[in-house]
Amino acid sequence: MREITNRRMRLGALLIVALASALALSSCAGSLSWIQDRLPPPAEVDGGIMFRYHAPSARQVTLAGSFNNWGGTQGGGRYDPSIDSMSDTDGNGTWTVVLPLPPGRYQYKYVIDGGIRWEQDPNNPDKATEGGIENSLIVVPPNVSYEYEIVTGTVIGEGAGFDREAAKSTTTITGEGVSFEVDLPDAGAVALAGTFNGWDPDALPLTKGDDGLWRASIELEPGEYLYKFVVDGTWIEDPGNPESVDDGYGGANSVLIVE
């Protein structure tokens, strides 16, 4: 009887050791996964700022932010998954890209699998808000060592039908919505694009009246919005709105606050 009891005790001890080992291995694996997920925040490397994002199950990851019109086409348009695509060259699930960003403040997110998910940077505690949406924030200092090019989306080209000195505009906010009116009598086409319509230059065309003024109205929930006018394909800030923020391209986005 004593021998049977001893055997049971040894079996019990072995089971306890096996269970403890399994728990230790599980904890170790979880710790390794946590360590792998904890990547450095965006930082300067040779050639620009390196962004890193751990997504082992993703088929594609791109970087979208105020520096590339949120992954839109040049001048701001629909999301394009070919813009600032990240790479996972060694197959370890960590996606990277290096961008030669000019000094400035930029909001950004990681876009997974063509736009299925838009994620903040889990390794960057700095945040900012655009259009009521919270994004990750990076501030590129003026003393970076890499070369960069400033590209502006607000330069007025030839034949744009826009006289910056003479242009006037009025924005009216009522309980029924927001009305925009801009004086561009020589323009061939004018549209309004901003955070309220995904920076889509085709979503909200303005209508030209007999008086030469272009008008449009839109219903907006309370919040802060960024926007520009698109004049014959050229993106410009609102000439009648003094409130603006840096657009990341050497120009400015106009700011609209609806209360």
Image (spheres, helix red, strand yellow):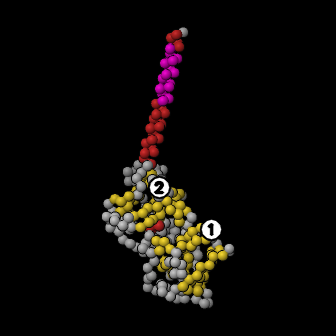
Q: Amino acid at mark 2?
A: Pro
Sequence-wise first label, 1 or 2: 2
Tell me where the magenta segment starts and ends, as one range: 6-20
- SS of the residue at dot 2? loop
Q: Which residue is mark 2?
A: 125
Q: Residue at x 42, y 47 (%)?
A: 36
Residue 66 horizontal/vertical position (percent): 47, 67
Q: Amino acid at mark 1?
A: Pro
Point out the image quarter for the N terminus. top right
Point out the image quarter for the C terminus. bottom right
* Overall secondary structure of the magenta section: helix
Residue closer to the observer: 154 or 137: 137
Asked if residue 19 is among those painted magenta in the image, a careful observer would answer: yes
Q: Residue at x 38, y 58 (%)?
A: 43
Considering every residue shown, the one lying at the far bottom of the view is 211
Q: Quadrant of residue 180?
A: bottom right
Q: Which mark is residue 182?
A: none
Considering every residue shown, the one lying at the far top of the view is 1
Residue 179 horizontal/vertical position (percent): 62, 78
Q: Which residue is mark 1?
A: 222
Considering every residue shown, the one lying at the far right of the view is 176
* C-alpha separation, residue under disc 1 versus residue under disc 2: 26 Å
